[in-house]
Amino acid sequence: MHRKRTVAIGFLLLCLLRATSWIIPSNPNSLPATEQQAILYGIVGISGLLFAGRGLSDRLRTSIWASLSITSVGLLGLPVVLIGWTHGGITETGISALFAAVPAVVAIGMATGTEEAGRKFLTPALVAFGGALLLLPVGLPGSLLGDLKLAGLILAILLVGICSVRIFRLLQPLAYLDAVVIIGLSNAAFLTIYCITNGSLLWRWNQLTPIASIASLIDLIEITLLIWLLREMPPIRLSARSLVIPLFTVIEGYIVLRPQITVRLTVGAALLIAGAAWILFAKIEENEPVLSLH
């Protein structure tokens, strides 16, 4: 029970930190998102390497770190690139609304395997996704380039959902610090290579100053929390963060901006809350091994 409470607190903290990121003022001199994420993942990976202790190479077979590296890049690094590419074609609220489909992708991915829970959670995931579409304006593009960016965003959503299921299985036999090293360094390497090949590497000592900021510290906490939760929470539960985060953001926006409440917003919020609550609190059978917390 104590472990479940700790995991629940970690999940709530992750959602709150991500939901309140819009309140923290951004530095106009900060690095582009991909470069900043490359540095942050590098810091996380190197920090994990310092504390992981000796014998890391002995504990990790080549097949394990290779599979985990590829899966973690598909879950974290590659979506960062794809989301960055969609900016300008799709709004931030539109991205949040469409990413509410991640729990449905996770449920389908589980249902195609042996997990009965995938079928059980598909309906509430779709209900919550419908609520997000009502609550958040999407603003679909009307040009060819905009359609391509939308396709890139859909690819990112599919990657996050599919890789979430796979990475949970890969992380079960690993210690947390070992996972931090592999996930942190592999994503740092991928994002750095992308920036170099894309010709957008801008690192300068004066431009690295914004890394030592409250926003970057929060990002580091989010990364370390997420890696821990990827191992400790069943993937369908953790995927609910894509529902809870926009819900918290909307609540914060209402408190700060006091917009007019409409029937559409009310129905959307109700569907989003109902679907997220079902995913987070519905019982998962103990005999489903891939969903075990142990």
Image (cartoon, rainbow, N blue to C red):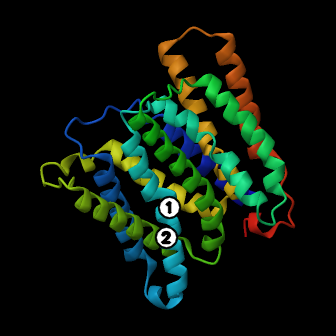
The N terminus appears in which quarter of the rendering?
Answer: bottom right
> Residue 194 in the image: x percent, y percent?
31, 60
- In the rendered structure, the answer to whether residue 251 lies left or right of residue 196 reads right
Q: Is residue 30 placed above or below 55 in the rendered structure?
A: above
Q: Which mark is residue 74?
A: 1
Residue 16's disc is none
Q: Residue at point 45% right, 32% down?
A: 92
Instruction: Pick whichever, 290 or 127, lies toward us.
Output: 127
Q: Amino acid at mark 1?
A: Gly
CA gap, disc 2 and disc 1: 6 Å
Q: Position of residue 78 (x, y in %)?
A: 44, 57
Query: Quick check: 122 left or right of 171?
Result: right
Compared to residue 76, the image places residue 243 above or below, namely: above
Residue 60 in view here: no
**Quarter where residue 85 is shown:** top left
x and y percentages locating residue 186 in the rendered image: 40, 69
Q: Are marks 2 and 1 in contact (CB under 8 Å)?
A: yes
**Nearer to us in this view, 153 or 9:** 153
Q: Which mark is residue 70?
A: 2
Return the x and y of residue 75 as percentages of the image width and height: 52, 58
